Image (cartoon, rainbow, N blue to C red):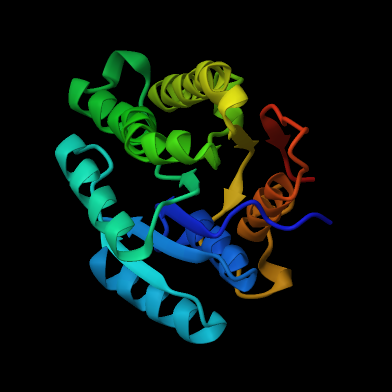
Amino acid sequence: MNELRATRALITGGASGIGLAIAEALAREGVELILASRRQSLLEQAAARLSAQYGVRVLPLVLDVCDGPQVRAQHAQASALLGPIDLLINNSGVGSDYLVQDLPESEWDRVMNTCAKGTFLLTQACLPDMLARRHGTIINIASQAAKHGYARANVYCAAKFAVLGFAKALREEVQHQGIRVHTLCPGLVQVPPPACAAERKPGWLQVEDLAEAVLYTLRQPAHVQLDEIGMTGI
C-alpha cells in the first residue's frame, strides 16, 4: 500500500464515535491530530489517551462548527501551534426526527448549520493553506441520506444532500491544484460502539469500518480520484 497522504489532520466531532475512531486509526499511522468538538471534557480525555498511546501530538480544540468567527480563529490558533493542516475530516453532524409539517424552523437551522454550514466553514478555513502548498485532502462524512430520502429525516437528508453537492462542486474547483475531495456515504452506524462482537447489530456498520475507509482513501496514488464511497452493513 502507498503511504498515507497526511501528516496533520483536523477532525470535527473528534471526541467520540466516528470521529474518534478515525482519529485513532490516523494516530496509529503517526498522524498528528487536532480534535474539534464542543465537549471539552471528552475532548481532553480523548486527546490525552491518543497522545499517550501512540506518541503523536494531539490538540483538543473546543469548537462550534456553526460559528464562522470562532472557526477561523481556532483554525489559526491550531495551525500556529501544530503547523499547516493537510487533512480535514468534516464529521460533525446531527439528526432530527420530525414530519415536515411538524418540523420547527429552529430545528431546520440547527441541523442544516451543523451538517452543511459547518462543512463549508471548516473547508473555507483550511483551503487557503492547502492551495498555497498544493497539497491537501478533504474527506466529508455524509450518509446514505445524501443520496436517498427517508421519512422523518427530511432536514437531515437535505443537509447531507447539501454536503454531497458542495463536495462535488469543490472537487471541480480544486482537483487540479493538488487538493483531493472525497465523501463517505455510510448507512446506519452503531454509535456508541458495542462492547463486544455479540452486541453488534446486524446490518449496521461499525465506526472502525469508516476509519478503514478513510485510510484506504488516503493511500490511493496521486493519479487516482475517488468519487463518493457508499457503505452499508449486511
Which residue occupies 15% across, 39% down? 69
| Furthest residue in direction bottom, as rendered | 52
Is residue 90 shown above or below 23? Answer: above
Percent coordinates x, y for residue 84 in the rendering: 40, 52
* Left or right of 78, for residue 171: right
Residue 72 appearing in the image? yes
Which residue occupies 62% across, 72% down? 28
**Camera-nearest residue between 96 and 32:** 32
Which residue occupies 24% across, 26% down? 109
**Camera-nearest residue between 58 and 183:** 58
Percent coordinates x, y for residue 40 in the rendering: 24, 67
Q: Residue 226 lies in what quarter of the image? A: top right
**Camera-nearest residue between 195 and 93:** 93
* Left or right of 68, for residue 91: right
Which residue occupies 35% across, 26% down? 98
* Left or right of 102, for residue 199: right
Is residue 22 shown above or below 101? Answer: below
Percent coordinates x, y for residue 87 in the rendering: 51, 48
* Left or right of 44, for residue 12: right
Quadrant assignment for the N terminus: bottom right
How many numbered discs? 0
Is residue 63 shown above or below 153? Answer: below
